[in-house]
Image (cartoon, coloured by chain):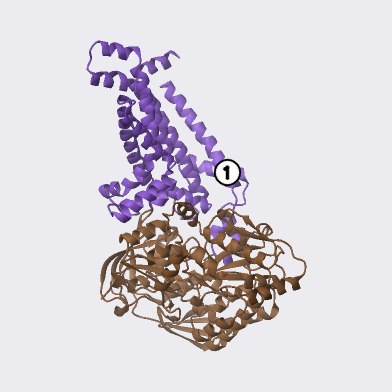
Chain colours: A brown, B purple
Amino acid sequence: MPASATRHRVSAGVALCAIASLTAACSGAGPSGAAADAKADVKLVDATPAAAGQLDRATWLIAKEPTNLDLSNDDANDQSDLIMANVCERLNQLEPDMSVGPGLASKYEWKTPTQLVFTIRDNAKFHDGAPVTMDDVVWSMQRNATDGNSESDEFPNVQSFAQTGPHELTFTMKQPDAVFVEALAGNAGLIQERKVVEAQGKAFGTPSSPDACSGPLKVKSWQPGTSVVLTKADGYRDPAKASKVDEITFKWAADDAIVNSLVTGSAQGAYIDTISSAARLVRSPGLTVSQGPDTRVWSYLVTERGGLADPNLRKALSLALDREGVNRAAFAGLGQPWKEPVGSGAWGYEKPTFQAAYDKLPGSPAKPSEADLAEAKKLVSAAGATKPIVVASDSSSIRNTLANALVDAAQKIGLQASIAQIPTVQYGDFYDNPDLRGQADVFMDDYYVSKSDPVGFYKNGASTSSVQWVFKDPAYDKLVLDGRAALDGPARAKIAIELAQRWADAKPWISAILSPSTVALSSKVTGVPASGSVRYYPWAADLGTKG
Amino acid sequence: VAVLVRRLGALVLTLLVSSFVIFAGMYAAPGDPLTFLIKNPEDRTPDRVAAVRAAYHLDDSFFSQYLSWLKGVLHGDLGTSFVYKQPVSDLMTSRLPVTLTLVVMAALLFVVVGVLLGVVSALKRGTTIDATITGVTTFLTSVPNFVVALVLVSVFSVQLEWFDVAGSGEGFGDRLHHLTLPAIALAIGAFAVVSRVTRQTMVEQQSLEHVDVARSFGLPRRTVVRRHVLRNSLGPVVTMCGLIIASMLAGTVVIESVFGLSGVGSMLVESVNAHDFPVVQAILLYMVLAYMAVTIVVDLLYPLIDPRTLERSAAA
């Protein structure tokens, strides 16, 4: 996945469910009462309880076929990441609690503020039995940093890198860069076997090609259109973390088919993308549903069209928005009303500090009180004459609900707003097409960052950002640079919090709902993380039987 | 033979025209393929965008894009998928068996059941059985097939657990088992049409002179029905079944999605959404081709059913 830092997802799969829900047989949002009950059963945890025993085989469902298993390729998708997280290893490793721990490198150290030294393990083996050599490590880094590779944008501050000892890799930096260390737990830090990748050439990552990695599971087969099968790798470097599942088969299906397969027990688990469909799973005996922190948040992205050019209007809308109502209607109560554009999964360090700062963020109530509405009206009158606001929606139920909620909020505080329908196939163009942005003041998207660091998201508030169009603040731009350079956790957290406050004050996006990472498991199996770490953490290796 | 050559000529011409229309349609559709080629908006720097646009010839004129595609096809190269980076022909060959098996099963089902119901209603004309068959099949036809599909899944897969909920199975027997419910859902709408056409033509035939004559010779009823009524009714029934099969080949989209089948239909939806031009183009051409192939087969069957049609076309 080609997403270095962040990616938005174009949810095309929702449309069919929207048709199907007319019949009430679809697994979509249930009645709100049932959904509220559903919520009570769901636990917010980093991981499901550890497995007791070895599992011989499991079937795991995903929303789509992976497009390519070469993670450095722009064509790889979310499903490629989810599968290959178990197969490939990075210099660092993202842990289930979203912190960054050691991966193929046993440790790293900032020798000087611009000298970053990694110690590479000497006992790791690729899946064809060859040892992981320093040559492979350096070559992989070169591949990841090459222009055109989806991760190359993670290396802006890297001047050079080279082998500096028998097991030592040293990056020489133009300036200190804390975010780079986190990026090396993602696809920027991917280590693959040079011989295999070069031998496959253009075919690398397609169904016929073997994997070139060293993780606890390996790719056994990819039958296009049918399944991807992983098996336990022999002689994984850390016996304690060897795979607890012998073979796991990935199959893909639409949301309702995933729900039905889990209910009938023909599959053992799935990470659920459309969380409203988990409501029926929560009520099913024989299944457990767990939720964990992720960075994914649904927000309203404000365009430069002009209807919301005044920050006071954006703040007023945020105050009047009924996030709880949206959560019930579009997410079956399984999301969380959220105040900032990045979820709690970004708190990979200094968690209590971030939580306390989040709790204090003003201006984004779960349900607007009378006082909130009064304040919002005051902001509107301070703004003077206003233009009617156009909200872009598409055929998906989540966007329709969000659009209606915003129109409702606008009307409550005396603003005019209407909804424009944009075809789903065109919706993703809002980011790049200024003409399209000229047609609407607001569009909605779920945005996530793959680095567990708020700084990794808030860089998007910079004046040069390509994903926000209304906020320009030189002081903020400087903080973004400082945040990246702050190698010390508490210092970086302080900067991140200031970024969050400035962003909240300007609201280039109005944030609505946190979409937690959600996993459904047959009650016979357990062990996998529930958090967003599954993009890069070898989660399937933890899947085993219950005690 | 001349007829066949003429038909093939028409086929090629139709393919050419439809490929152009489809290409133009995809070209004119809203949305920029670039959004899908570089998924992360933060990665869409001007340099990257320019490189990708050049690599995929997105800035070439419509005609030069169409001509280069056409040239590839004439050389047997359907192109490479934007999304999967695999040759389109590979993607098609991995998905086609599922769709074709599904259509064959559905076709067998609606032909056998539909014709049988039609024969029964014609023979029992005016009775409660006739009325019941007409009523039930009409009702089934009026229910959209995705609703039928959802009901079938919820009863037979979720409640009774007789069938798997999703997937197309591996190996021949398993595949038939997996495709049973989808085939029923696909076929059910055709029952009414086929049984009605069968009933109507049989009723007409029964009142014709040659049937009266046969009957007056004292031939047993069974022989009269089989040799005179049914045989002469086959023409319209075969035509109808052919048309239905042809449209099914292009109409598996919804059923494949509901039952989680990786067939050509679900790939079409996915490709349209992702602006995967080469794949969309190939699938739509397959659909046109399949439609025409079925109608040609029906035309070829005609003389076998009724040799008079051959004489007529020879005279013409």
Instruction: Residue B295 in the image: state x and y as whole percent.
Output: 42, 30
Q: Chain of mark 1?
A: B
| Residue B162 located left or right of residue A197 | left
Q: Position of residue B88 (x, y in %)?
A: 45, 48
Q: Quadrant of the C terminus of chain B?
A: top left
Classify the position of the N terminus of chain B by image quarter: top left
Q: Nearer the viewer, residue B32 or A74?
A: B32
Provide the residue designation for mark 1: B25
Residue B278 appears in view: yes
| Residue neighbourhood size for the residue with mark 1, other residues' Cα within 10 Å, grouped as few (<14), some (14–19), many (≥20) | few
Which quarter of the picture shows residue A207?
Answer: bottom left
Question: Which residue is at a point 55% across and 44% down the rendered structure image?
Answer: B68
Q: Position of residue A478 (x, y in %)?
A: 66, 81
- Picture quadrant where residue A321 is located: bottom right
Q: Is A68 in front, or is A50?
A: A50
- Which residue is the extreme one toward the front? B128
Q: In this rendering, does residue A463 appear at all? A: no
| Residue positioned 37% across, 31% down in the render | B194
